[in-house]
Image (spheres, rainbow, N blue to C red):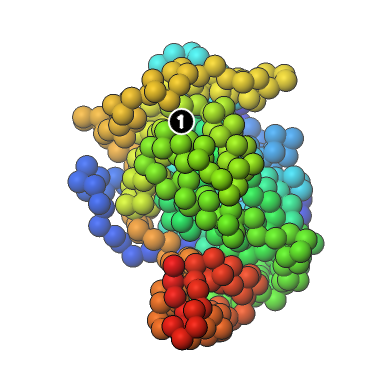
Amino acid sequence: MLLRHSFSRFSSPSWISRAPSAMPLRAKVTNPAFRTAMMSTDIPKELPGDEADDVLFNSIYGLRSVELNRPKKLNSLNGSMARKIFPRLKEWEKSHLANMILISGAGSKALCAGGDVAALALQNEQGPEGQKASTDFFGLEYRLDHTIATYPKPVISFMDGITMGGGVGLSMHAPFRIATERTLFAMPETTIGFFPDVGGSFFLPRLDGETGTYLALTSERLKGVQALYAGIATHYLHSSALSGMVQRLSELTFPDHMALPERLEIVNKTMAEFSVGLPPLDEEPMLMAGSLRTAIDRCFAFDTVEKIFEALEKETEHKEWAQKTLETLSSRSPTSLKVTLRQMRLGKKWSISETFQREHEISANFMRHPDFVEGVKARLMSKPPRQAEWKPATLAEVTDETVESFFKIPEGESRLPLLSEGDYNAYPHAHFALPSEAEIEEVARQGHSSRRPVIEAFLEKYSHRDGVRRKVVEVLARRTTTESGEGLKWI
């Protein structure tokens, strides 16, 4: 699975003419067990047996590109690919000629459909040694994700096509995440007896309301512009515009003294030149909006999976949705559901570094759990796919003690060493996405007579960016009233 690659040459991506992350402030780690900085200077390198050309690298003026090149496997990420990417990112980090990084996938079907979990499942069946090897792969993957999340130069990710699991880890932590009409986003881990990793502990709980919890537990898919509305993507462009935009970005130059935030703003304005607008709402309405969004928040606000089930059973306004959601959750691994919900509640307080170190421990526990192998075999390796036989089979059999064991730090075990000291508790580049509901609430509560001043304030702040008006209007319609004589009230 996991051969040879020449680091001395650049290969041309299949899209040629088709191209961050902020260096964040240090933040205090919230958990005492993680106070000791775990950093490694050992950059992963290729191993004998690694595949050739499963990642292609290219240089276009100041732009450096990373193209995942396993299109027949939907660019699924494996150790061979990660080991090739690390040295390049570190090389470009030091280069004055490299202005920005682009991450994309070969072909038109996927950025990356996830990690190569079929190979991991087969590896796990070999016993403790195989399970440790699988855990080591996740450590490699998480270190790569953290490197992208704390990269000192602009990073752009093309979420063009399927972007799931490991593909989300390579994109979600970049300042610029471009969705297209072909984007298909999901975190499908509970389907295979796992948990939404690759930093899901960090970004999912920070999405609006309970949408992150909903996406984590149900593996609901977001298509095209829905990824922008949900806060997953920062921009929406038609796939036909990507080639021209890359060429334009490659021509940008930055003075050596220019700070990263200024560079990011220039990249952001440049990308805006290639927008052709969003699909009309009558053709592609916002899905997690209106009364359905209220139902999501209402049903997924609880701290136990059992209570979420009860809320869905009592849901009257959206009965069909609630029934479908119940059926979906009932097919998932009970252990995965309970661990994932606990992860969503704890992850709100984890820094980006602690997130990946914690997830490494959780993944190790899942590699030792029978549900991962069973889930992968049932859903991905069986023809046709079958319903997995989970152990334990019911929610009642998954005790609180079992769930908590996934989050305990084993005595004497070393933390996952990261390659960057960068850390933060909130994305320093969050403002490149649409405004959050919390941000809209703050402005709406400032004593306005109507909704119009709030809308105008955000349009001005976000330079009339695509989707801002739609997002603000939807939130205000759902969360505010304009009662006569009392002005705008948040409800």
Crowding near pointer 1: few (<14 within 10 Å), some, many (20+)? many
Return the residue found at the far top.
126
Quick one: quadrant of the N terminus? top right
Question: Is residue 311 depicted above or below 454 in this figure?
Answer: above
**Residue 275: x %, y % from top left:** 72, 71
Given residues 263 and 320, the one toward you in this image is 320
Left or right: 317, with 333 as reference point: right
Left or right: 254, with 282 as reference point: left
Could you say which quadrant of the image residue 468 lies in? bottom right
**Does residue 107 appear anywhere in the picture?**
yes
**Residue 207: x %, y % from top left:** 48, 56
**Residue 53: x %, y % from top left:** 67, 40
Which residue is at 47% across, 35% downward? 309
**Residue 197: x %, y % from top left:** 47, 40
Which residue is at 21% across, 30% downward? 412
Could you say which quadrant of the image residue 191 lies in? top right
Given residues 65 and 164, the one toward you in this image is 164
Identified by mark 1, the residue type is: Ser
Question: Is residue 236 depicted above or below 76 in this figure?
Answer: below
Return the residue found at the far front.
484
Which residue is at 47% across, 50% downward? 298
Given residues 413 and 224, the one toward you in this image is 224
Left or right: 417, with 252 as reference point: left
- Number of residue marks: 1
Residue holding disc 1: 336
Question: Is residue 228 depicted above or below 41 in this figure?
Answer: below
Question: Is residue 158 depicted above or below 50 in this figure?
Answer: below
* Label 1 residue SS: helix
Given residues 197 and 222, the one toward you in this image is 222
